[in-house]
Amino acid sequence: MKFTLSWLKDHLETTAPLDDILFALTDLGHEVEGLENPADTLGAFRICRVIEAVQHPNADRLRLCRVETYPNGPGTEPQEIQVVCGAPNARTGLVGVFAPVGTHVPGTGVDLKPGNIRGVDSNGMLCSERELMLSDDHDGIIDLPTDAPLGARFIDYRGLNDPMIYVKITPNRPDGLGVRGLARDLAARGLGTLKPMETPEIKGTFPCPITVEIHPDLATKAPHFTGRLICGVKNGPSPKWMQARLRAIGLRPISALVDITNYFTIGLNRPLHVFDAAHVTGTLHIRPAAAGETLLALDGKTYSLAPTHMVIADDNGPESLAGIMGGQASGVTDTTTDVYLESAWWDPITIAATGRALKINSDARYRFERGVDPAFTLPGLHAATQMILDLCGGEASEITSNGAAIDTTRQYKFDATRTASLVGMDIPESTQRQTLTALGFTLTGTLATPPTWRPDVQGEADLVEEIARIASLSKLVGKPLARTAPGIPAPILTTAQTRDRSARRTLAALGYNECVTYSFIDHQSATLFGGGTDAVRVDNPISSEMSHLRPDLLPGLLRAAVRNQARGFMDMQLAEVGPAFSGGEPGEQHTQAAGILIGQTAPRDPFGSRRPADIYDAKADAEAVLAALGAPARAQITRKVPAWFHPGRAGTIALGPNTLATYGEIHPKIVAEMDLKGPVMAFTVYPTSVPLPKVKTTTRPALAISGLQAVDRDFAFVVDKTVEALTALNAAQGADKALITSVQLFDQFMGEKAEAQMGIGKKSIALTVRLQPTTATLTDKEIEAVCAKIIEKVSKATGGTLRG
């Protein structure tokens, strides 16, 4: 939203400095993004007088001028400067505009330097309007009246010292898309008084020959349409003051009729449209476009229309895209004498959908899709009619209309104490009421009715927001929360939040670099990791690489590893804690803690400590994370792993049917699909699967330790070479859960030498078992009994025998 300071002062009676206005706008929620001050670009150009202009001695088309300048302003000591000028109107006695050496000329982009033109020195420039970017006129230099004040700044004399302000309006504040809406906010803040705006009711002098019909299917999309014929207009250039304002905000003046509609769009947030009545045949129909219809719009482009697009058509076909852009066939020109002025209210969603489908961005669409004031439809028509009659002449007909302004009346309870409870600002009730009234709210007892131009106000909290916004949230003072009860406050973090933090801290302590990847991944990666279904497909993805919700954290980590390898980083430990998705519904989201290891475990050194990362590194890190989450130590290891892990080099840590973590080597096919180099070790921990402690406590449990001597016993079993060592470990662990505290594999003898000693297809596995008594020292008989049970359990589970 762009406007000039003088435009703002048409609506706001204020003496506030510009800096105060800019600060207040941003503080009120209308962020000031830019300021163009003519004094910065045109302040050096001053009014001068040509003392004498004679023919250049060495050029027929150049004039040698003696120029009287006043560099220090009017009434100061004049200076005479010699200037070579090529303008045909350069003459003795001309009062013009002078640019001294060192001035930047915006129309040419040149910084003036002392020059020598055809052997004659020239120190400055006499300027044309195009060189000052005031118009396209370059036929001669600026020729001012002889009574113009010599030495005065040209921008002050011409009234061009009008700063242009550029503010960013949030989508929920459509009223801020009009200069008057911003002036209203500033007046409520106390930076001036909102000037009253009288909307005259222009009576028509004859019936309007153009009637309007709204298609029944569009009754809610085009609920109110008004218009009238104005005959006998003269469509010349608009007044200079209007052209200056439009040009200052980047709009090109076209003609008086078009400029008036643009002026109302920016000034009052009331988009209008004028049709050349000579090119309107019969009745105007607001209807859906027919399949195959086209419209040559005012931007010079031809658009193919669809039945979802709403048009204003006459008996011959579409004349305008409703609420977006008019058609070229009925556009006004310099020869237009009769115009049909239209002011309507359009459904924001319909306008947004049509504009997006046709890729048309216009000031009208920008405002209608955010919501203009429905109650100002008819008053806006009257006000525009008055301006057309004043500037273009003519005679207005009676108004033709269809429908009525939509009813936006709604009331919310006004409770002055809510401002303190919601925002923490103590504002007197009288001030609160005064603020709402200044913003256009109607207060009746304890009920507040929002104005028709504020569709964003939808509840009691919005009333508080308006009060706090006008009072300035920058004045909000931070205060500590009051303690409701003595003693230690209850924990703030939930169990899930505590576990997520513990997982992050543990992974960082293990040497992993934390990644934060997108929750959206491409379809190929999602499919590789068990996802990619329609249930997790994003309807409107940012890009093709973000089309699906991720089923696992590993795809994002692997993509990050690919980018690192492409930049020469081959040894990595990357980890992430975040959500993964099994579906698109509530409850189909879970938290994971995942990590990958690629390359070597350490940098090169002379001690031989460098080795490739393996599955045992991934297993150890997964177990460390589970331990930090409070998982029981006696979890089972199984071979049932997801398809993206190597089937023979991966495992699952589980408690019965409950999977706590998976670890191992990523399947080589996955590695190849994702363009990774080398084997990749990975793990995924599921914090939500870790059972909660049965007894909630805020302190650590007592250390349970026995002072009795532990007993270690070693066992070697001859088993088939296809038997997994894990089977023997689990069997030995279950022999006596009270006494046996740990079982570990310490040797595995296999291969040709083993088969030569123990038989074809056999191998030897050796276990060490620790027995820890807690009540009394174990006797030899008790130890032998436990050992016999271990041998029995392992032999039965593996089919093996005790090695002699």
Image (spheres, grey):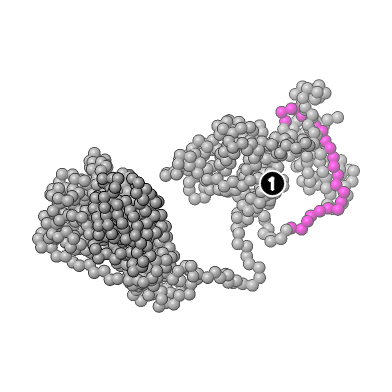
Q: Residue at horizontal 39%, vertical 72%?
A: 190
Circle 1 is placed at which residue position? Answer: 510
Q: Is residue 689 magenta?
A: no
Left/right of residue 295 with respect to residue 582 in the rendered view: left
The percent coordinates of residue 105 (x first, y second) are 36, 53
Give above or below for 324 relative to 646: below
The front one of 595 and 344 is 344
The front one of 410 and 451 is 451
Q: Is residue 369 visible?
A: no
| Crowd class of label 1 (few under 14; some 14 to 19; many from 20; radius 10 Å) | few
Specify the quadrant of the image occupied by residue 297. Answer: top left
Amino acid type at circle 1 is: Leu
The percent coordinates of residue 739 (x first, y second) are 81, 47
Q: Is residue 719 magenta?
A: yes
SS assignment at label 1: loop
The percent coordinates of residue 320 (x first, y second) are 22, 48
Specify the quadrant of the image occupied by residue 767. Answer: top right
Give above or below for 617 relative to 143: above
Q: How many marks?
A: 1
- Image quadrant holding the C terminus, namely top right
Q: Residue at horizontal 42%, vertical 66%?
A: 19
Q: Residue at horizontal 72%, vertical 33%?
A: 724
Q: Residue furthest right?
A: 780
The percent coordinates of residue 45 (x first, y second) are 34, 59
Q: Is residue 723 visible?
A: yes
The front one of 234 and 57 is 57
Q: Residue at horizontal 49%, vertical 37%?
A: 523
Numbered range of the magenta stretch: 701-723
The front one of 647 and 575 is 575
Give above or below for 297 relative to 153: above
